[in-house]
Amino acid sequence: MTEDRIQKANPLQLAIFKEDLEKNIKSLSANLHKLPSGSQQFIRSICEHYDTKDWVSDNQAIWLAGANIYLNNLGSYEEQEAQKIYAPEILQLFRSVGNKISFPRIRYWLENGDRIDIYPSSKTNHLLCYVYNDLEVSKQSKIYIAKISQLDALVTFSTSVAELYKNQLKELFQEPIEKLKINGREQVQCCFCGISLQSEISRAVGYGPICADNWGLPWEKSEEDLLIKL
Ligand SMILES: [Zn+2]
């Protein structure tokens, strides 16, 4: 809005325009560092122009509004990033297996008797997470709940995933090895291949010696394991 047009504008419109403009300038001045480095100086000069002259041209106002829209989108992008869930340790476990076994699988029993299994997709570069219900019944049902990218460990939940399973997976992803060990101990079944654990060491660590070797995990009783041992 040029000086000339400011003088002709109706006072209410002008007040609204100035209020918006000042809000824009205030938020821009505080967040200049978040703008692409190439436009920081340019936007700063417009803000300074307004500070000293109390008006900006229409084009300058459009530039300010554009920069502000950029910042707002950046905010929601950062929010989205913060909400993303990654499972790097799970990915690392499967990477340590490499080609040692053809069908690597993690088994994670839940308190309600269901079991979450994680294993590589045969078609895509993902680790798939399924829930197995009614494990006692011969005709088990299998529900897809999430996948983990083998490129960056990003977790994508199924849109229909039940909150219970989502939370269980989130907990597992935070400290998978510890959770799996406890789970294997409680079930007295190997948290990888699922066979029943025979020896004292296997029962203490939650998996058997062959799986320990395949998954690159220690197979010995640590003091900590003995303390937790059921
Ligand atoms: Zn095993």
Image (cartoon, rainbow, N blue to C red):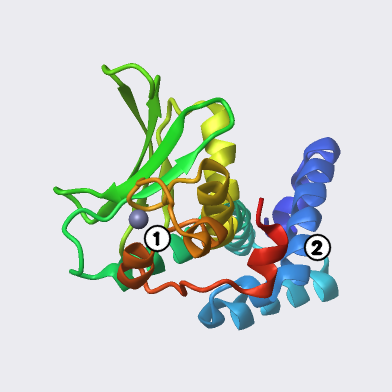
Q: Quadrant of residue 131?
A: top left
Please give the name of the residue rendered at 74% of the width and 71% of the height, measured from the top-left corner: 47
Whether residue 66 can be seen here: no
Disc 1 on helix, strand or loop? loop
Of badges 2 and 1, nearer the viewer stands 1
For this orientation, the residue located farthest to the front is: 199
Tell me the amino acid under the disc marked 2: Lys
Whether residue 133 can be seen here: yes
Q: Position of residue 62 (x, y in %)?
A: 58, 57
Q: Position of residue 147 (x, y in %)?
A: 36, 46
In the image, is residue 29 above or below residue 19? Answer: below
Please give the name of the residue rendered at 37% of the width and 42% of the height, measured from the top-left corner: 117
Please give the name of the residue rendered at 20% of the width and 62% of the height, measured from the top-left corner: 101
Disc 2 on helix, strand or loop? helix
Instruction: Work out which quarter of the rendered image holds the N terminus and state it.
Output: bottom right
Q: Residue tagged by mark 1?
A: 208
Q: Residue tagged by mark 2?
A: 26
Tell me the amino acid under the disc marked 1: Gly
Total tally of numbered discs in the picture: 2
- In whole angstroms, how far apart are the C-alphas of marks 2 and 1? 62 Å
Q: Tell whether 20 sits left or right of 220.
A: right
Q: Tell whether 204 sits left or right of 218.
A: right
Q: Position of residue 43 (x, y in %)?
A: 64, 73
Please give the name of the residue rendered at 68% of the width and 73% of the height, measured from the top-left corner: 223
**Mark 2 residue CB less than 8 A from any atom of ligand 1:** no
**Mark 1 residue CB less than 8 A from any atom of ligand 1:** yes
Of the pair 22 and 116, the residue shown nearer to us? 116
Mark 2 vs 1, N-terminal side:
2
